[in-house]
Image (tube, rainbow, N blue to C red):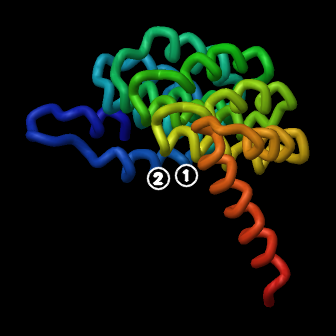
Amino acid sequence: MLRAVAPRRRPRGLPSWVAVESLCAFDHAAAPVIEEATLHPDPAVRHVAATVIGVRPVPGAAPVVRERLAQETDPRALTAFVGALGWVGGAQDLAVLSELARHRDESVALAAVESLERLGLPASVAALGPLIENTRPRLAERAAVALTELGPAGRERLLGALDGDTPAVHPAHYALQLSAMRGAGRGVA
């Protein structure tokens, strides 16, 4: 399946979404093959392997993801590895995810924000807080929404941002309004 992703004689290989969907159906016996694919020379194969780890976490894959994350140069594959780290990583990954949340490629930065949220640690609030002042609107808004999902400490950070005259006011207001609308909709049958 993974070999079919990398183009050989054809102009294009197997679409990555087909490979991901198929590989997710395999049991844990496929884990070594998926981990090995993270080292493949073709970035499309690495992207598929990292996506599978993120969609269907592979037990024990955290060290592999961390190692590849430090070496990956392809933005699409890097985005998938960052997303996977949110599923298989832990508190020791906060620093690298915080750094990647400032990455120049917005897809990588957004994946880091989602991974920080997914980790759900109290320190995630501290990592996400400054991002609501980011000059990239999508990133600032996504960080603000992530803060609403991290409980009272995250919402408190957003409420504090409403008091100032900084770029954080708009993302904080947006996220709090969105959270209120979601909360109001939960009671509707």
- Measured Cα–Cα span from mark 1 to mark 2: 7 Å
The percent position of residue 114, horizontal first and vertical second, equals: 62, 39
Question: Marks 2 and 1: in contact by CB < 8 Å?
Answer: yes
Q: Tell me which residue sits at (53%, 22%) in the image.
A: 102
Circle 2 packing at 10 Å, graded few (<14), some (14-19), many (20+), is: some
Amino acid type for the residue under numbered disc 2: Glu
Circle 1 packing at 10 Å, graded few (<14), some (14-19), many (20+), is: few
Residue 29 can be seen in this image: no
Amino acid type for the residue under numbered disc 1: Ala
Q: Work out whether 69 lies above or below 84.
A: above
In this figure, which residue is indicated by the disc labeled 2?
21
Quadrant showing the C terminus? bottom right
Instruction: Name the foreground residue: 155 vs 65.
Output: 155
Residue 151 can be seen in this image: yes
Secondary structure category for the residue under label 2? helix
Q: Tell me which residue sits at (78%, 26%) in the image.
A: 126
The percent position of residue 40, horizontal first and vertical second, equals: 36, 19
Which of pointers 1 and 2 indicates the residue nearer the eye?
A: 2
The percent position of residue 99, horizontal first and vertical second, equals: 59, 17
Q: Quadrant of residue 67?
A: top right
Q: Residue furthest bottom?
A: 189
Quadrant showing the N terminus? top left
Q: Work out whether 173 lies above or below 144.
A: below
In this figure, which residue is indicated by the disc labeled 1?
25
In the image: residue 64, left or right of residue 23? right
In the image: residue 33, left or right of residue 144? left
